């Protein structure tokens, strides 16, 4: 059979010898595999970090897409510069200035999602074996990006105010004794993924002081900062950066549409230059067409109104989820009500392993991401991340009821 012979020929290729050491060490994400199962339409999924599809401004975008094609089609469908569309970078820099960040279009680089920026940072800063700090827990995509550059990731615990700065300094000194000088601190300071917490201003300033004292870069990842329901606005860490050591990044994925794959970084000209060189090899340029669309959307003044609508949509979802927890979860769980963003972080009673419990949850047609996935030191076994933006209000209520009964059964077995 023709097919057999192709399969046999593939088996003869010695892939192990051909792969780079780096590729040989790459592992597929177990979480992605688990999430595939959660795609069953009968499963109510609190697992992914997906925005509500109902929030996409389809009609507004139809008009913009039409006019971009009609008026600017010849440039919008062409290659663009690696750094990104100048007009878009300008309007992003203007908005950043309103948040206290001292930036011009020269400091801004458009990326294919923030995920590309995370990868770029790994590429320009990490040699194999280099150390970097991350939160315990932290964003899984950050862990994966840095691990692909063979980083040694050192976890710093979070409390209700985010990264515990005193523990960070202790860890820096401890590593120094072993002559290990870490490269950067990766932090999601506002409505953190997965823990939902916000780092207050005092702690942000302290973090800058530590980075200055120990010559560290801060990677500030801020996709959720504008999705604020209850808390006052807090200035980004980058706004306190006098030495040009903070790389700030945000994305249109959560405030407009992830399908556009448009995000941005703001960095000192030195770091921006390095990142642009690095990006040239990754994709030459970010999707030009969607950059034009996003630029028009921003310049039409629609973005702020749209963000307001998203917050109005998500706040009741957050409330339904937190209230359903109180109604359906057995006593013994901990969850701080997130003041914004898209996630609630729940820690269950002693003895429960949320990774094992996931299979029971799937049988009951409800899904989440277990806490260990977000913790580089293997902690987080009693925790789980619940996304409240994607499911409908009715699904949240029903899914939390299912999840409550799964936890209840687990707890009864433990007793
Ligand atoms: C903290 C954080 N950083 C980065 C990303 C990646 O976003 P993007 O869609 O812009 O690649 C996400 C997506 O969920 C995220 O939660």
Image (cartoon, rainbow, N blue to C red):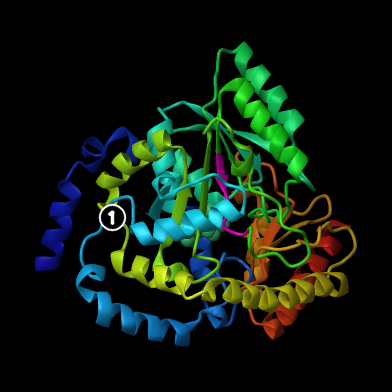
For the record, the magenta segment spans 219-224
Q: Residue at x 60, y 77 (%)?
A: 43
Would residue 112 be visible to someone looking at this image?
A: no
Horizontal and vertical percent position of residue 51: 56, 71
Of 323 and 114, the residue lying toward us:
114
Q: Secondary structure at mark 1?
A: loop
Horizontal and vertical percent position of residue 231: 77, 60
Of 116 and 410, the residue lying toward us:
116
Q: Quadrant of the C terminus?
A: bottom right
Q: Quadrant of residue 329?
A: bottom right
Horizontal and vertical percent position of residue 92: 48, 58
Residue 226 counted in the magenta span: no
How many discs mark residues in the rendered view? 1
Horizontal and vertical percent position of residue 291: 36, 65
Is the residue at mark 1 in contact range of ligand 1, meaning its CB lies under 8 Å from it?
no
Q: Quadrant of the N terminus?
A: bottom left
Q: Residue at x 73, y 46 (%)?
A: 199
Residue at image mark 1:
285
Q: Residue at x 68, y 34 (%)?
A: 207
């Amino acid at each position: 059979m023709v097919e057999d012979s192709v399969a046999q020929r593939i088996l003869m290729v010695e892939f192990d010898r051909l792969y780079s050491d780096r590729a040989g060490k790459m592992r597929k994400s177990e979480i992605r595999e688990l999430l595939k199962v959660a795609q069953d339409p009968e499963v109510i999924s609190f697992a992914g970090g997906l925005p509500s599809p109902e929030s996409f401004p389809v009609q507004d975008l139809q008009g913009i897409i039409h006019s971009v094609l009609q008026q600017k089609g010849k440039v919008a469908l062409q290659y663009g510069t690696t750094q990104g569309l100048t007009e878009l970078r300008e309007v992003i820099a203007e908005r950043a200035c309103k948040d206290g960040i001292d930036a011009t279009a020269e400091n801004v680089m458009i990326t294919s999602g923030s995920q590309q920026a995370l990868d770029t940072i790994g590429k320009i800063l990490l040699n194999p074996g280099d150390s970097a700090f991350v939160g315990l827990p932290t964003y899984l995509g950050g862990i994966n990006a840095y691990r692909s550059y063979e980083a040694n990731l050192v976890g710093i615990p979070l409390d209700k105010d985010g990264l515990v700065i005193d523990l960070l300094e202790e860890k820096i000194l401890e590593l120094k004794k072993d002559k290990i000088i870490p490269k950067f601190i990766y932090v999601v300071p506002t409505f953190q993924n997965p823990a939902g917490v916000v780092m207050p201003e005092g702690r942000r300033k302290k973090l800058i002081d530590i980075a200055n004292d120990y010559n560290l870069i801060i990677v500030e990842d801020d996709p959720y900062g504008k999705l604020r329901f209850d808390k006052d606005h807090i200035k980004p860490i980058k706004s306190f950066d006098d030495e040009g050591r903070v790389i700030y990044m945000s994305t249109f994925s959560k405030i407009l549409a992830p399908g556009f794959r448009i995000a941005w970084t703001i960095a000192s000209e030195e770091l921006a230059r390095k990142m642009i060189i690095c990006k040239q090899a990754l994709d030459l340029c970010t999707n030009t067409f969607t950059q034009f669309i996003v630029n028009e959307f921003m310049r039409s003044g629609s973005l702020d109104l749209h963000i307001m609508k998203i917050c109005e949509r998500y706040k009741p979802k957050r409330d339904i989820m937190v209230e359903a927890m109180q109604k359906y979860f057995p006593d013994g769980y901990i969850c701080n009500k997130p003041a914004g963003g898209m996630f609630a972080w729940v820690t269950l009673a002693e003895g429960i392993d949320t990774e094992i419990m996931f299979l029971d949850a799937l049988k009951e047609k409800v899904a989440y991401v277990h806490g260990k996935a977000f913790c580089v030191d293997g902690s987080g076994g009693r925790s789980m991340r619940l996304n409240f933006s994607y499911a409908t209000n009715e699904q949240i209520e029903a899914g939390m009821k299912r999840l409550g009964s799964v936890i209840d059964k687990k707890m009864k077995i433990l007793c």
